[in-house]
Image (spheres, grey):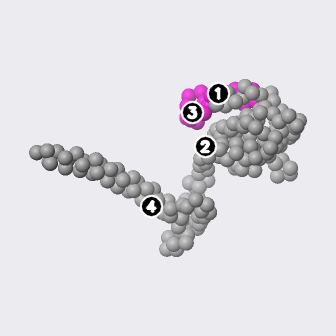
C-alpha cells in the first residue's frame, strides 16, 4: 500500500506539470498559427520569425489582396505601452543632464515627468525630452512634459489604469492641464521633422 501511495505521490505532480507544459505549448502554437495566417503563404521567408530571437529583426510581408481594405481603414495600431514607456525613459536618461525620468504612455498621449537639469533652461530641457520621445513613437501621439516634481506622483497615479477605466479620460485631461503649466518647449508633432 505504501509503495502505491509513493507512486501516486510522484506520478501526480509529474502528470500535472506535463499537462501544464502541453497546454502552454499548444497555446503558443495556436498563437503562432494565427500570426502565420496573415503572412504570405507558400514562401517560408515571408512568414513570421519563429521563435523571435533576442536581437532578431522584425519582418512581415503582406500583399494588398490579403487584406480586407475596409477593415484596414479602421484598423487600430497596437503598441505595447509598457515597453514604449520603458524605451522613452531609458533614452532620455542617456543624456548626462537627466537624473530622474518617468514616462506614462496612455491612449493618445505620452506624459513625461523629469527632474530639471541644472545646466539647461527649462525650455531647452523640455525640447530635449520631447524630441527624444517623438523620435521613438508613432506620430499620432501628443507628448506633454513637466519638470514639476509633483508630476511624478500625478502620472504614477495612472500607472495601474487601463484606457477602459471609468473617468480615465478625465483624469488624464486633468494631469495634462497641470503639466502644461510647465514649459512645453517648441517641439510638437507637426514641427518635429523640421527640428
Is 173 placed left or right of 54 in the picture?
Answer: right
Q: Which residue is mark 1?
A: 171
Q: Quadrant of the N terminus?
A: top left
Give left or right: position of 170 versus 149. left
Residue 146 coordinates in the image, percent (x, y) = 77, 32
Query: Residue 15 placed where, x, y %?
Result: 27, 51
- The residue segment tinted magenta is 157-180
Label annotation for residue 82: 2
Earlier-in-chain disc, 4 versus 1: 4
* Residue visible at 85% across and 34% down in the picture: 118
Secondary structure under badge 1? helix
Q: Nearer the viewer, residue 101 or 157?
A: 101
Q: Tell me the residue that label 3 is attached to.
A: 160
Mark 4 / mark 2, whichever is N-terminal: 4
Q: Residue 170 location in percent, x, y?
A: 65, 27
User: For the residue carrying disc 1, how many other residues have a C-alpha within 10 Å: few (<14), some (14-19), or many (20+)?
Assistant: some
Residue 130: say if magenta. no
Membership of 162 in magenta stretch = yes
Q: Are marks 4 and 2 in contact (CB under 8 Å)?
A: no
Mark positioned earlier in the residue sequence (2 or 1)? 2
Task: Give SS at disc 3.
Answer: loop
Q: Which residue is mark 4?
A: 33
- In the image, 90: left or right of 56? right
x 62%, y 63%: residue: 57
Amino acid at each position: 500500500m505504501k509503495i502505491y501511495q509513493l507512486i501516486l505521490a510522484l506520478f501526480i505532480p509529474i502528470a500535472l506539470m506535463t499537462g501544464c507544459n502541453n497546454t502552454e505549448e499548444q497555446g503558443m502554437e495556436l498563437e503562432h498559427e494565427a500570426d502565420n495566417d496573415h503572412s504570405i503563404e507558400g514562401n517560408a521567408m515571408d512568414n513570421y520569425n519563429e521563435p523571435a530571437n533576442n536581437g532578431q529583426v522584425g519582418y512581415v510581408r503582406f500583399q494588398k489582396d490579403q487584406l480586407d481594405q475596409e477593415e484596414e481603414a479602421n484598423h487600430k495600431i497596437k503598441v505595447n505601452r509598457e515597453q514604449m514607456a520603458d524605451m522613452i525613459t531609458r533614452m532620455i536618461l542617456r543624456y548626462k543632464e537627466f537624473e530622474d525620468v518617468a514616462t506614462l504612455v496612455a491612449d493618445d498621449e505620452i506624459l513625461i515627468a523629469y527632474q530639471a537639469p541644472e545646466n539647461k533652461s527649462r525650455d531647452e530641457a523640455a525640447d530635449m525630452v520631447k524630441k527624444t520621445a517623438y523620435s521613438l513613437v508613432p506620430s499620432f501621439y501628443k507628448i506633454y512634459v513637466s519638470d514639476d516634481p509633483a508630476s511624478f506622483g500625478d502620472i504614477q497615479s495612472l500607472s495601474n489604469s487601463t484606457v477602459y477605466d471609468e473617468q480615465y479620460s478625465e483624469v488624464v485631461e486633468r494631469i495634462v492641464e497641470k503639466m502644461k503649466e510647465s514649459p512645453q518647449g517648441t517641439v510638437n508633432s507637426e514641427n518635429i521633422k523640421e527640428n
